[in-house]
Amino acid sequence: MFSKVLIANRGEIALRILRACKEMGIQTVAVHSTADADAMHVRLADESVCIGPAPAKDSYLNIPSIMAACEITGADAVHPGYGFLSENARFSQILAEHNIAFIGPSAHHIDIMGDKIEAKRTAKALGIPVVPGSEGGVTEDAEAKRIAKEIGYPVIIKAASGGGGRGMKVAKNEQEIGVALSTARTEAKAAFGDDAVYIEKYLGKPRHIEIQVLGDGKGRAVHLGERDCSLQRRHQKVWEEACAPTITAEQRDRIGMICANAVAEMKYSGAGTIEFLYEDGEFYFIEMNTRLQVEHPVTERITNVDIVYEQIRIAAGMEMTVKQEEVQFWGHAIEVRINAEDPETFAPSPGTISYYHPAGGVGVRVDSGVYQGYKIPPYYDSLIGKLIVHGRTRPECLQRLNRALDEFVVDGVKTTLPLFRKLIKEPDVIAGNYDIHWLEKYLAK
Ligand code: ADP
């Protein structure tokens, strides 16, 4: 096992990883920018190193600086969390060259899944159902029209290097395809430095359902069921559930095993998430994230598996402690993302938290890096915490969430808590009756 893990991240996820390390008897190193000197992850770590000024490109994305911090502290592994360098194959490669373990998959797997055309091709070859569309990249209008006609309109043109919901264009008919193709390529080039795009069928009312997997890198893998993350704003998830309100145990088993088998066959190592759109009883692969996800706690809550603990064990070459036949799904869990944002305009609201009282009690977990008096810096994403509740049934879980939202107080900055207090009273939310467009339509009312 590792003796010292450097956590190349900040905020709630840095704390989440730090807690797992402490429980495993592993020393922790926090890295931080000058803006984060007072952050909780810095206070709780055994050691800390300042790796640069506030902008992420100079600190949390600064590979030489992080390598120097490893060298100074003698860390023998790095956990990248999510975002920042978590899906950077080069970083994983550099660490390997310095005999420092990357707590995540191989550079090869990060590379394959980072290119969505390659990811889709790989998924299809491994027996995962994909959205009907082009086999590879598309550059010519005529070719785009031929494929679109074959799969039927509307279609969506997506950037191979896309991420964060950017670089996508919908074409409703043949007249729109030329412009959609050229704007998608121009935007993809500007945003990602790569103009490769592909076409797929545009699904009108899908849910976003993803499968959590763990692979040991030697051909053994398990799935931990699904999460429904359909409540999204601008393709960003705001509310996540496990199990999904609409999926049966048979469907979970079937798609879960398809994913676990694929991951085993790839000899994938570590935690991953295979994301699908789900419509009319069918699953359609859209991408695989080769890292820990923000919403992993809902899965932890219903399966009693500590995903970060397993990630660390796998990276250290040890056996996973999870066996598929032992995985059970207990009750229902919901996570809401508390962002320091105006709950109506979603404008970021950095500033000092003047009063902080998190919810507590039975079935409540709060993953957060903030405290009373903490100054939220304006430089990073606005997630300040996650409220995760568990109940024996979905109705019980909703009641508990309602109660926990009532208790939760964050003063001094605006947060998305009021949005959740409204959502929990919406009949569609109570009924679990929503697709990926539901929240946008609700907010536009
Ligand atoms: P990114 O990596 O940018 O997040 P994804 O491929 O995961 O891109 O897609 C992000 C979101 O875009 C999905 O959650 C869904 O809302 C929408 N989307 C993507 N592909 C399709 C499709 N074929 N039909 C309908 N919506 C889609």
Image: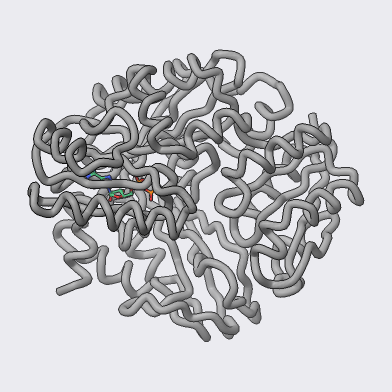
Residue at the (56%, 36%) spot, across then down = 307
Q: Nearer the viewer, residue 53 or 180?
A: 180
**Residue placed most toward the observer, 383 or 52:** 52
> Residue at left 8%, top 52%?
175
Q: Residue at x 65, y 60 (%)?
A: 10
- Residue 148 sits in which quadrant? top left
Count up the numbered dots: 0
Residue 395: x percent and y percent? 25, 50
Which residue is at the front of the view, 357 or 156?
A: 156
Left or right relative to 435: residue 106: right
Q: Can residue 313 be seen in the rendering of this structure?
A: yes
Quarter of the figure with residue 87: top right
The residue positioned 18% from the left and 72% from the top of the image is 444
**Left/right of residue 140 with respect to residue 172 in the rendered view:** right
* Residue 114 horizontal side relative to residue 149, left or right: right
- Visible in this render: residue 330? no
Q: Is residue 376 above or below residue 390?
A: below
Locate the C terminus and report the quarter of the image it occupies.
bottom left
Image coordinates of residue 333 in percent, x first then y, are 38, 46
Q: How far from the left and from the top, in percent, is residue 436? A: 23, 52
Name above or below for residue 129 compared with residue 381.
above
Which corner quadrant holds the N terminus?
Answer: top right
Where residue 365 appears, x then y in whole percent?
51, 54
